[in-house]
Image (cartoon, rainbow, N blue to C red):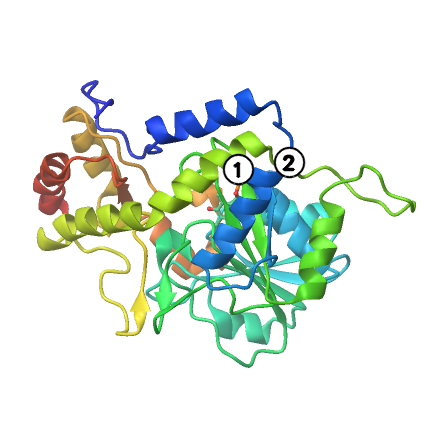
Amino acid sequence: MALKVGMIPHNLPTLGLEEQAAAAQTLASGWVAQGPEVEAFENELCQFLDLPSGHAVAVSSGSAALFLALWALGGKNKRVGLPVYACAALRNAVGLIDGKCVYLDCEEGSPNVDVSAAIRADIGILIAPSMFGIPADLPESRGFLVIEDLAQSLGAMIAGKRIGLRGEIGICSFYATKLMTTGGQGGAVISRDRVLIEKVRDYREFDCRDDTKLRFNFQITDMQAAVGRVQLGKLPTFLEQREQLFGIYHEASLDLLGATVAEAIRPVRYRAVMRCAEPMRLIETLRQNDICAIVPVERWELLDMHENYPVADRLTGATISLPIYPALAASDAQKVASIAKYFA
Ligand SMILES: *Cc1c(COP(=O)(O)O)cnc(C)c1O
């Protein structure tokens, strides 16, 4: 592999000659803006998620996808529930649409949002990420609209079906370090609802319109989509490679989030997050052994005052994220495990 520079990074995109060839071919074709590659990518994403063609819209980032999802659901002035234990992209999207953020704690024993708290919070919309690849628990009846955030969980399954479509609308991120990338930045909005998805598609571009409605430019390029198509084709293999690495950590008896889940649930291993009493000491010990590990969500990264969210607050002080990505050698994962197990 191309990355033998001494240090084992925390994560890394897996880009090969096929991605290079796809990008080069698009450049050589002379058509680089949004076009046939984007449409093909969208439809392959639909296939992957078992959606009919036309139900995915590729956009420039996961953040853009969140904004568009909130826009399509009429998020302006609505109370929008979001977990404090997540990434700032959620807060930014709610801010941009002029919604009201209603912050929520995690469910006890899980990095995901506490849906019973969401039900009590009188919200109009919930943004529900499945953190670290572990499917969030979303009840069927709930009294608010749901945006499923698949940024960390594309490919995860419940009862043999891929998640992402349990709410009104779903979003993906194809940023460099997510499960797959469209060459650095990218995202998508997905929905079973034809009306919602056409609203999103309409807002994505502004050119050649015969009315004065506000729109924006949230497009990705054909070059990005061509890279994305190759990555999507490799995604099942990537997920399998991640599962095997997770298995190495699991066999070393590390206390990993999402290691034991209900039988019907199949997480993807976006992150190998280990519970440990002294995260900073473990991070330092790993660093001395040329291994990068991080606190997956730091206390200061919580989206609201930490003392009001005890479950999330405790997670920030008791977890570390170990290296996991398709190109990580099994021998390197074993080396990580052999050190981490003394901190379990
Ligand atoms: C990365 C991420 C996003 C934002 O995606 P970008 O493509 O980086 O804008 C949103 N939600 C979650 C849960 C993420 O991990």
**Coordinates of residue 92 in the picture (x, y in percent):** 63, 44
Q: Residue furthest top?
A: 5
Under circle 2, the secondary element is loop
**Which label belongs to residue 118?**
none
Mark 2 neighbour density, 10 Å: few (under 14) some (14–19) many (20 or more): some
- Give the vertical position of 140 relative to 18 (above or below): below
User: Do callouts 2 and 1 mark residues in contact (Cβ within 8 Å)?
Assistant: yes
Mark 1 neighbour density, 10 Å: few (under 14) some (14–19) many (20 or more): many
**Coordinates of residue 302 in the picture (x, y in percent):** 48, 47
Which amino acid lies under the numbered mark 1 shown in the image of this protein?
Ala
**Which label belongs to residue 225?**
1
Q: Compare residues 167 and 85 and report the one nearer the observer.
A: 167
Which residue is located at x 54 percent, y 22 percent? 27
Which amino acid lies under the numbered mark 2 shown in the image of this protein?
Gln
Which residue is located at x 48 percent, y 51 percent? 44
Which residue is located at x 35 percent, y 47 percent? 235
Under circle 1, the secondary element is helix
130 lies left or right of 251: right
- Give the vertical position of 269 relative to 104 (above or below): above
**Which label belongs to residue 34?**
2
Q: Residue furthest front?
A: 29
Which residue is located at x 20 percent, y 27 percent? 287
